[in-house]
């Protein structure tokens, strides 16, 4: 079968942290990352992205970027697949491995196993750009403990958490089906792993938060 060449968006990640008054910031050691990620590097002092009084790092992704409890499970999945690639032969194995890791790390019963963990709205303030040059706050339900910023409609073993919005959603919320070259990121929220299990059902999807050109996350100390 001949593969068809196609364009795909590549997203830039910029991470900036306030520098402690009396401390140094050691370089980040080289990481073995999946092909969907660009490694993070600290920008040089002469770079236009550098801000005085802050440590600034840059990286990127093609597939997705997640934050919250799901990110911990995703990292464990990647680590296990890296060590035993021969065990990950098909989508069913990938999905069952995700489910097993979610169970062992308490993602299925997050409110019971991790009662002190906070939801995304408590951890970070999120601003989005739906139209070029216009920033607005993203309203995140208090039940959401994980958000995923999607470029490809493939996540958690090949599932599509955005799905295909119906005609009413497209009209009322200005949502569209996901495309890899549309210049948009789909932002999806999940309450726990049970919420993620709805992706296995026909037309199942996560909580569609927004489709955006740009997104800023301001983490609270």
Image (cartoon, helix red, strand yellow):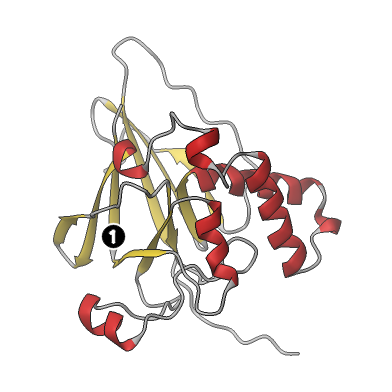
Kindly indicate the quadrant of the structure image that contains residue 10: bottom left
State the residue at coordinates (53%, 46%): 71
The answer to whether residue 76 is left or right of residue 93 is: left
For the residue pair 198 and 147, the one nearer the viewer reads as 198
**Could you tell me which secondary element the residue under label 1 belongs to?**
strand
Q: Is residue 136 left or right of residue 148?
A: left
Residue found at the very far top of the displayed protein: 22
- Label 1 sits on residue: 214
The percent position of residue 158, horizontal first and vertical second, equals 62, 68
Give residue 145's position: percent from left, percent from top.
42, 46
Is residue 49 among the parts visible in the rendering? no
Residue 75 visible in rendering: yes
Please provide percent x and percent y for residue 106.
59, 40
Name the residue at 53% across, 71% down: 160
- Name the residue rendered at 47%, 51% in the picture: 66
Relative placement, left or right, of 175 versus 203 is left
Horizontal and vertical percent position of residue 216: 28, 49
Instruction: State the residue lying farthest toward the left.
Output: 134
Q: Who is closer to the viewer here, 144 or 60?
A: 144
């Amino acid at each position: 079968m001949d593969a068809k060449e196609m364009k795909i968006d590549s997203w830039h990640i910029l991470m900036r942290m306030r520098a402690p008054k009396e401390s140094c910031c050691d370089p980040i050691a080289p990481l073995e990352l999946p092909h969907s990620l660009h490694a993070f590097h600290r920008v040089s002092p002469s770079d236009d992205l550098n801000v005085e009084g802050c440590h600034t790092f840059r990286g990127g992704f093609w597939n997705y970027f997640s934050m919250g409890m799901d990110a911990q499970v995703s990292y464990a999945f990647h680590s296990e697949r890296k060590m035993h690639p021969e065990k990950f032969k098909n989508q069913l194995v990938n999905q069952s491995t995700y489910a097993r890791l979610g169970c062992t790390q308490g993602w299925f019963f997050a409110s019971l196993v991790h009662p002190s963990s906070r939801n995304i709205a408590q951890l970070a303030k999120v601003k989005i750009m739906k139209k070029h040059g216009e920033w607005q706050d993203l309203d995140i339900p208090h039940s959401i403990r994980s958000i995923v910023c999607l470029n490809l409609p493939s996540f958690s073993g090949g599932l599509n958490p955005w799905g295909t919005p119906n005609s009413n959603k497209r009209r009322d919320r200005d949502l569209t089906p996901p495309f890899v070259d549309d210049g948009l990121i789909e932002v999806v929220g999940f309450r726990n792993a049970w919420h993620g299990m709805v992706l296995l059902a026909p037309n199942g999807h996560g909580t569609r938060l927004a489709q955006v050109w740009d997104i800023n996350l301001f983490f609270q100390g």
